[in-house]
Image (cartoon, grey):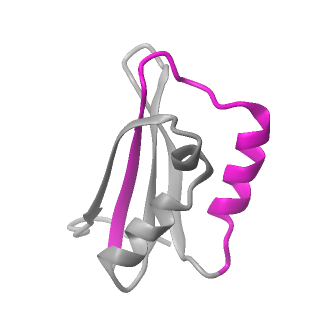
Amino acid sequence: MLFAVMGFFKPGVDTAPAHLQADLNEHLAQPAMNVRLAGYLKDAEGRRTGLMAILDVDSHARAQAYLHASPYFIAGLYERCEVAEYDLELGRLG
């Protein structure tokens, strides 16, 4: 099943410290999780407002655990987070 995992930054946060970026890259590259897509969400002016990943995992709980293990989540950069099953209607991943 596909899940969208989204974290929306707190006001004033549009970049993470360099050490967290390296940790995030490792988190996204975990071989145990099938990250199909990942990238930053941006507003109309091009400022980063959050991060979204599409995971191919077997349960909502597993997607939630992935979010909670994120270096950005642990560092408290997110104001709001959401995990939702993603029902692909058009196009394809991979």
Q: Where residue 11 sits: x, y (%)?
A: 42, 19
Q: Quadrant of residue 15?
A: top right
Q: Where residue 79 sits: x, y (%)?
A: 37, 33
Q: Residue at x 73, y 60 (%)?
A: 26
Image height of 78 relative to 44, above or below: below
Observer-nearest residue: 81 or 53? 81
- Asked if residue 49 lies left or right of residue 85, the reply is right
- Asked if residue 40 lies left or right of residue 57, the reply is right
- Asked if residue 63 lies left or right of residue 88, the reply is right
Q: Residue at x 42, y 80 (%)?
A: 57
Please give the range of residues in magenta: 2-31
Q: How many marks?
A: 0
Q: Where residue 90 sits: x, y (%)?
A: 25, 65
- Asked if residue 55 lies left or right of residue 59, the reply is right
As drawn, which residue projects farthest toward the bottom? 58
Q: Where residue 88 sits: x, y (%)?
A: 26, 68
Residue 7 belongs to magenta span: yes
Image height of 17 relative to 85, above or below: above
Quadrant (top left/top right/bottom left/bottom right) for the N terminus: bottom left
Image height of 11 relative to 17, above or below: above
Q: Residue at x 78, y 34 (%)?
A: 18
Observer-nearest residue: 88 or 57? 57
Observer-nearest residue: 39 or 14? 14
Q: Residue at x 43, y 77 (%)?
A: 56
